[in-house]
Image: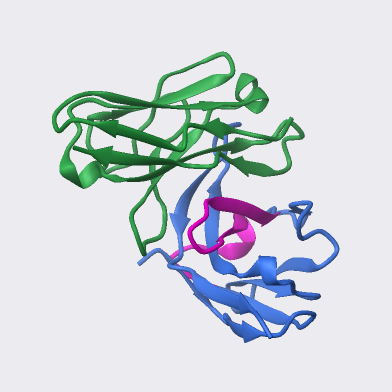
Chain colours: A blue, B green
Amino acid sequence: EVQLVESGGGLVQPGGSLRLSCAASGFTVSSNYLSWVRQAPGKGLEWVSVIYSGGSTYYADSVKGRFTISRDSSKNTLYLQMNSLRPEDTAVHYCARVNTAMASWYFDLWGRGTLVTVSS
Amino acid sequence: SSELTQDPAVSVALGQTVRITCQGYSLRSYYASWYQQKPGQAPVLVIYGKNNRPSGIPDRFSGPSSGNTASLTITGAQAEDEADYYCSSRDSSGNRVVFGGGTKLTVL
C-alpha cells in the first residue's frame, strides 16, 4: 500500500528541538519530491519545506534557518529537524508527496500528521 | 507575490451549485490544486492541473481557471461536501509552494 506515516511529534519547551519522521511505503522517497505542511490549531494549511529528488531543499521564510528537511534512502524515510522552536510552531505537521509530472505541482499523497506542541 | 487569497466562508443550499475562488499572482504561471479537509482529517486532493480529478473524486467537482483566479465549482452540492477547501500552487519563484487561507463551505 502506498502511504506516508509521520511520527516524532510531542510536547517541547520553547527553544527546544524535535525531529519528525515520515516513513514511506509503496514508493521510493529518493525518487520523489516530498514536503512538510503544517496546520496550527484552528488555522489553515501552511507549506513548510520541500526536498527535491535531486536533493535541493527549500523552506518557508517562517522556518528558514531553524528547520532542516532531509531523507534517508536506506530507511525510505523523510525527516524534519526542528530547532529553536517557538510557540507559534505548534501545529499538526503533515508530510506529503509532491507530484511534479506537470509544471503545476500538487500534493497527491498525505500522511495523517503528527502534533507538535511548543509550550512551557 | 507569494499569496493566494480565498473567501473565508461560503454557503450553498443542498443540491445547488457553489463556486469557491482563489486569487494570486502565481496563478498566472501555474494551475492551482484544491484540497478538501474535514475536521480531524488530513487534506484530500480534489482537483489538480487543468481541471483534473483524482480517481474517486465525484464529477460534481470541477476546477476552471482564468488569469490570476482559480475556481473550485461543486455542481449539485451534497451534505458530505461540507468541509474546508484550500487552494495551492507553486509560488512565483517556482521553488516553493503557497496555500490559500482556506474556505469553510457550509451546505444548508
Q: Quadrant of residue A50?
A: bottom right
The residue at 17%/28% (across/down) is B76
In percent of width and height, residue A20 lies at 62, 76
**Which residue is at a point 59% across and 36% down the rendered structure image?**
B89
Could you say which is closer to the camera, residue B50 or residue B72? B72
Furthest-top residue in this view: B67
Q: Is residue A72 visible?
A: no
Q: Residue extending furthest right? A: A65
- Name the image quarter holding residue A79: bottom right
Vertical position of residue B60 compared to residue A72: above or below: above
- Quarter in which the C terminus of chain A is drawn: bottom right
Highlighted magenta segment, given as a residue range: A23-50
Where residue A90 appears, x then y in whole percent? 61, 70
Q: Is residue A48 magenta?
A: yes
Residue occupying the point 28% across, 40% down: B106
- Residue A59 belongs to the span the image colors magenta: no
**Screen quadrant of the N terminus of chain A:** bottom left
Q: Is residue A73 above or below residue A30?
A: below
Left or right: B106 as drawn, with respect to A93: left
Q: Is residue A99 above or below residue A8?
A: above
Q: Is residue B80 left or right of residue A15?
A: left
Q: Position of residue B86 (x, y in %)?
A: 47, 41
Q: Is residue A115 visible?
A: yes
Residue A75 image offset from top left, x and y in percent: 60, 79
Q: Identify the residue shown where x is 52% and y is 51%.
A: A44
Q: State which quadrant residue A19 falls in.
A: bottom right
